[in-house]
Image (spheres, rainbow, N blue to C red):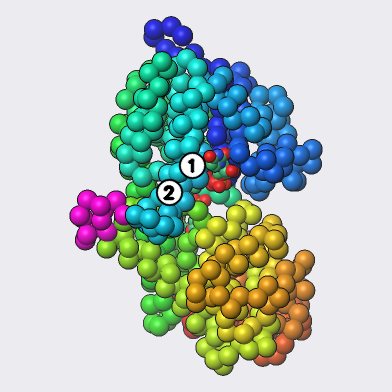
């Protein structure tokens, strides 16, 4: 290390999940001179990252297998050797999960920083020399303070803490990482900021690298997710109004989005947002506002979350109403269980709540998804049944089907919940005979075409377009 800059040759990433895995794979691919070790306490997960058959790696992302096959064993390694890799790293990325607290102060809203704290203690004990710690996980504002307080207890070592939130969206992670809109780095130590910035500058235009103080960086990530979630709740609220007035949500979204000040992204009406981030980060923001007695601000963001829950409920209710008020003994085909297309992630998927509502009404579900396993579906439904309202849950009331035809067989209705490409191509004229009669199509993702469905005898409901 010279006085002007830090020398970086080894990176350690703690957490081999949806963020750690893809983001480190892309750094490894763009920086062959760096050695990157991803460590995780979950042995099973690490085994899958190291599996000979790349189809078994634990995260499904378009183009990820290709990159992992190029860099794994060359400059990207997966292991459970947390202490050893911390010891030799120049930079440590923290990519562990920060779920919403389920008990104690702030339960249901605040983030649980238990995992980050454990990591900080492991780093304080095992790091050697000067180490740069990078928060990649989305965290409440001033989390870096917590890390600092833990690390500072070890006076023989030195640390620089940076906030470098990840903005990738699942399903397009590789493209987002290779061509991001911006890279955000917050910190106090200019040399550390430069060291991290130099890594990104290997493939990203320097003008896209925004440098801020720690707290602006942490708050910018929460705010970005809150704004994106707000856009979805706004368009979803208007979808209900379209259904009452004869307007078409896609036409409205196109017209509204053509205004550059509003922008045409994130205006697709659907069954509500899912995923590991939006709900957790909104709750986090609400908690923060309440903590600082900003009650009106807290209420504003709470309403974004409320519309999301309302949208999911209104879809379940509408399905029951259209099917004559009862689902008893009726088979329903569910197309899509992941929270969006092109991912096998089911965290907070709207499909969980909608499926549970339909099961509660006595239906049997045939669930299809190109990437989600039945084990995963069962886990999500079972976890959700811990809510008292859903404790009726019975594992025998649904089946995962291997293909779409099997899902549609004898179904009184089909509900499209994820916008997978294979569902866009369904030729409904040729599928109608599989279903019971009269049958319904409920399209919550606006991926079907009214014109082609009008050629069938199927009843049709499409979000934001009732007429
Ligand atoms: C994300 C992001 O980092 C965060 O920004 C987001 O808000 C939610 O969590 P993600 O990669 O999606 O992370 O989470 P996940 O797939 O659960 O991966 C986290 C990994 O960290 C898990 O594999 C877990 O085993 C590992 N972990 C957790 C450790 O290795 N050590 C710990 O102490 C805690
Ligand atoms: C999000 C942010 O986009 C990303 O920047 C951040 O780092 C993590 O959280 P992710 O949750 O992976 O990413 O996916 P995203 O594409 O944002 O979708 C989130 C949810 O919103 C999905 O359920 C999706 O179906 C829904 N959505 C998205 C809509 O309903 N309509 C839209 O127009 C866009």
Q: In the rendered view, tell whether residue 45 sits above or below residue 319.
A: above
Circle 2 packing at 10 Å, graded few (<14), some (14-19), many (20+), is many
Along the horizontal axis of the image, is 109 left or right of 203? left
Task: Residue 421: give its label.
Answer: none
Query: Which residue is drawn at the image coordinates 65% and 69% (left, top)?
Result: 335
Q: Quadrant of residue 106?
A: bottom left
Task: Mark yes or no: residue 454 visible.
Answer: no
Q: Ligand 1 shows up in which quadrant of the image?
A: top right
Task: Tell me what residue is drawn at x 72 percent, y 27 percent.
Answer: 73
Element at badge 1?
helix
Please say if the residues under marks 1 and 2 sit with CB atoms less than 8 Å apart. yes
Q: Does mark 1's beta carbon lie closer than 8 Å to ligand 1?
A: yes
Query: Left of 348 or right of it: where is 72?
Result: right
Check if residue 449 falls in the magenta segment. Answer: no
- As drawn, 443 above or below 411: above
Q: Which residue is mark 1?
A: 115
Q: Which residues are magenta?
A: 287-298
Q: Residue at x 35, y 63 (%)?
A: 304
Q: Which element carries disc 2, helix, strand or loop?
A: loop
Percent x, y for residue 275?
51, 56
**Relative to the observer, which residue lies in front, 83 or 135?**
83
The residue lying at 56 percent from left, 19 percent from top is 88
- Measure how far apart labels 1 and 2 are at the Cα level: 8 Å
């Amino acid at each position: 290390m010279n006085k002007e800059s830090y020398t970086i040759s080894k990176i350690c990433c703690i957490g081999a999940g949806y963020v750690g895995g893809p983001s480190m794979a892309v750094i490894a691919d763009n920086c062959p001179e760096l050695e990157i070790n991803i460590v995780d306490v979950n042995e099973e997960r690490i085994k899958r990252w190291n599996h000979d058959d790349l189809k078994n790696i634990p995260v499904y992302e378009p183009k990820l297998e290709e990159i992992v096959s190029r860099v794994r064993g060359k400059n990207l390694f997966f292991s459970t050797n947390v202490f050893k890799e911390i010891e030799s790293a120049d930079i440590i990325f923290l990519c562990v999960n920060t779920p919403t607290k389920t008990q104690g102060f702030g339960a249901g809203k605040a983030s649980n920083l238990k995992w980050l704290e454990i990591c900080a203690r492991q780093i304080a004990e095992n790091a050697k020399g000067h180490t740069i710690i990078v928060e990649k996980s989305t965290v409440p504002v001033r989390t870096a303070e917590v890390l600092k307080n833990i690390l500072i207890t070890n006076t023989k070592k030195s640390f620089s803490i940076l906030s470098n939130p990840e903005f990738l969206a699942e399903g397009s992670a590789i493209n987002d990482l290779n061509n991001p809109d911006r890279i955000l780095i917050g910190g106090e130590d200019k040399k550390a900021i430069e060291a991290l910035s130099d890594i990104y500058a290997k493939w990203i235009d320097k003008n896209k690298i925004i440098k801020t103080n720690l707290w602006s960086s942490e708050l910018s990530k929460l705010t970005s997710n809150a704004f994106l979630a707000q856009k979805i709740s706004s368009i979803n609220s208007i979808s209900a109004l379209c259904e009452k007035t004869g307007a078409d949500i896609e036409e409205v979204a196109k017209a509204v989005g053509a205004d550059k000040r509003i922008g045409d992204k994130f205006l697709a009406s659907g069954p509500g947002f899912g995923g590991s981030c939006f709900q957790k980060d909104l709750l986090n923001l609400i908690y923060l506002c309440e903590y600082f007695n900003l009650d009106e601000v807290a209420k504003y963001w709470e309403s974004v979350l409320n519309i999301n829950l309302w949208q999911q409920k209104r879809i379940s209710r509408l399905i029951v109403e259209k099917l004559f008020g009862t689902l008893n003994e009726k088979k329903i085909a569910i197309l899509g269980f992941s929270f969006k297309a092109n991912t096998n992630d089911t965290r907070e998927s709207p499909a969980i709540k909608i499926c549970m509502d339909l099961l509660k009404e006595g239906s049997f579900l045939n669930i299809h998804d190109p990437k989600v396993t039945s084990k995963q579906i069962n886990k999500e439904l079972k976890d959700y049944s811990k809510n008292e309202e859903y404790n009726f849950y019975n594992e025998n009331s649904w089946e995962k089907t291997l293909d779409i035809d099997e899902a549609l067989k004898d179904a009184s209705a089909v509900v499209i919940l994820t916008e997978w490409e294979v569902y866009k191509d369904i030729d409904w004229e040729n599928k109608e005979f599989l279903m019971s009669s009269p049958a319904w199509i409920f399209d919550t993702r606006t991926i079907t075409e009214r014109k082609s469905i009008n050629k069938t005898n199927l009843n049709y409901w499409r979000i934001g377009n009732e007429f």
